[in-house]
Amino acid sequence: MRRPVRAGLDRVLLRGLALAAALVLPLAFALDPPDGDLTELGGYAENRFGPRTPEAIFVPPLAEAAVPGAAYDVLVFGDAFSRPDAGERHGRYGHYWTDHLRNLTGLTIGVRPADAATLAAHLVSPDFRERPPRVVILQLSESALETPIGGLELSTVTTPRPQGVAAPHALPVEPLNRQPRSLERSRAQAWNPPPIGHALDLLVKALPRAVLNVTGGPVQERPLAYAGLFSSAAATTALFRAGDFQPWRADHRLLEERRARLHAIQDAVEANGVTRFLLLVAPDKGTVYADFLLEPPPHRSAVDEVLGADPTLQAVPLAAGLTALAAGGVRDLYAPNGSRWGLEGQLYAARTVARTLGRLGVLSGATDPSPDVAILPCRPGHGDCTPTRTQTD
């Protein structure tokens, strides 16, 4: 009796494997390799949400991972908006706003992980005491403000001016004028080994959403009021992190507490009398595109408003400018398949930071005041020479 039962189970198993192979293998050959953090996290097809316009990358990178003992004009403590995320397979230096900032100004730039404890430890290190940078930029994602800003007690850090170091002077703007390379995303190729693991992962995440109408995942696909905001095939919808629309972003009391903590960091950085501090809060994708959603979120981010209410906090406002660029027809300010800046967003951040450094007296000479974007040549026939906006509602 056991043999027929076992044989029957084997047949069922083989049929199940054959059915899985029939579903997965064609999908694996058809899928573009995963590239965006939102497509991968949410189980969405790269073919549908991947950008169709090229990115830009400097080879070799112009900014670099900060090396201990090296001197930099600008030391950036940043997250995945500024440096490759360790969890992303495709992240590499060369296509961040830090690279564009160096290209625009000629400043030497080192990048370290954005962590208050890491920054506090650096402020009491021999490196900071002996080789203070002209500027420390703390770049945080807007979503990082949801939790208290931890680290050492920065208000107790008082670094005296290094002996022999003169009063700070403005650094001349010396653009490098490098031309970045065009970086196209990978596409599905029948002769390459298919990404079977990605196909399985996509099915596991997408089938409950498509078949059972399961919602509440970490990534949301939301309809847009206008097409043409992104270059992807999904013209009238976009991907966002679910956390982009949480109500804490409109909590003024919480944001004022975060602002006070950030001001303490600024005071600690500038205590040596040599280094200037700059805060760069990268607005989340949902904050910038809230006005373009078919169903606007009930809570609007007040981060820029609260940070800007303290004129002594040296913060770079970005959200309103990015929204204005999107309204003007600039596509892919954020990657359509990801939660962070695309080429145009990176370039806008670099130009805004350069202008702010000029106002702070860090830079002397002309910085590029142009609001123009698109530093790569457009490709006739590919739709990226003249951005379009088409009303869909």
Image (cartoon, helix red, strand yellow):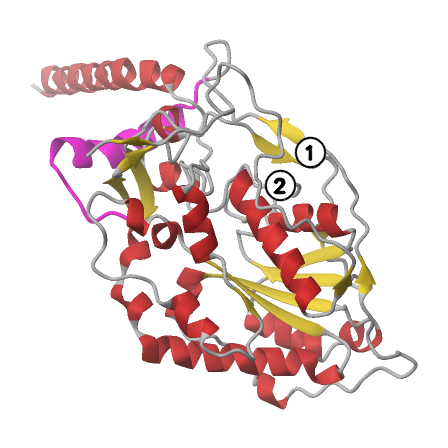
Tell me if residue 138 comes above or below residue 237 in the rendering. Answer: below
Contact flag, marks 1 and 2 (Cβ < 8 Å): yes
Magenta: main secondary structure = helix
Residue 361 is left or right of residue 251, and the answer is right
**Residue 180, visible in the rendered structure:** yes
What residue is shown at x 28% (from left), y 32% (from top)?
236
What residue is shown at x 70% (from left), y 73% (from top)?
276
Residue 15 drawn at (x, y percent): 19, 14
N-term-proximal mark, 1 vs 2: 2
SS for tag 2?
loop
Please tell me how crowded label 1 is: few (under 14), some (14-19), or many (20+) other residues with Cα within 10 Å. Answer: many
Which residue has dot 1 on it?
180
Please tell me how crowded label 2 is: few (under 14), some (14-19), or many (20+) other residues with Cα within 10 Å. Answer: many
Q: Residue furthest top?
A: 191
Residue 278 drawn at (x, y percent): 62, 68
Residue 230 circle label: none
**Position of the N terminus by quadrant:** top left
The part of the image, by quadrant, that contains residue 245 is bottom left
| Residue closest to the eye, 85 or 143 | 143
| Residue closest to the eye, 83 or 251 | 251
Residue 202 is left or right of residue 275, and the answer is left
Residue type (three-letter) at the residue carrying disc 1: Pro
Tell me if residue 356 comes above or below residue 91 in the rendering. Answer: below
Residue 370 drawn at (x, y percent): 62, 46
**Residue 70, visible in the rendered structure:** no
SS for tag 1?
loop
Residue numbers of the magenta segment: 194-218
What residue is shown at x 92% (from left), y 81% (from top)?
164
Q: Was residue 109 drawn as part of the magenta stretch in this picture? A: no
Q: Was residue 213 drawn as part of the magenta stretch in this picture? A: yes
Residue 95 circle label: 2
Tell me if residue 75 comes above or below residue 313 in the rendering. Answer: above
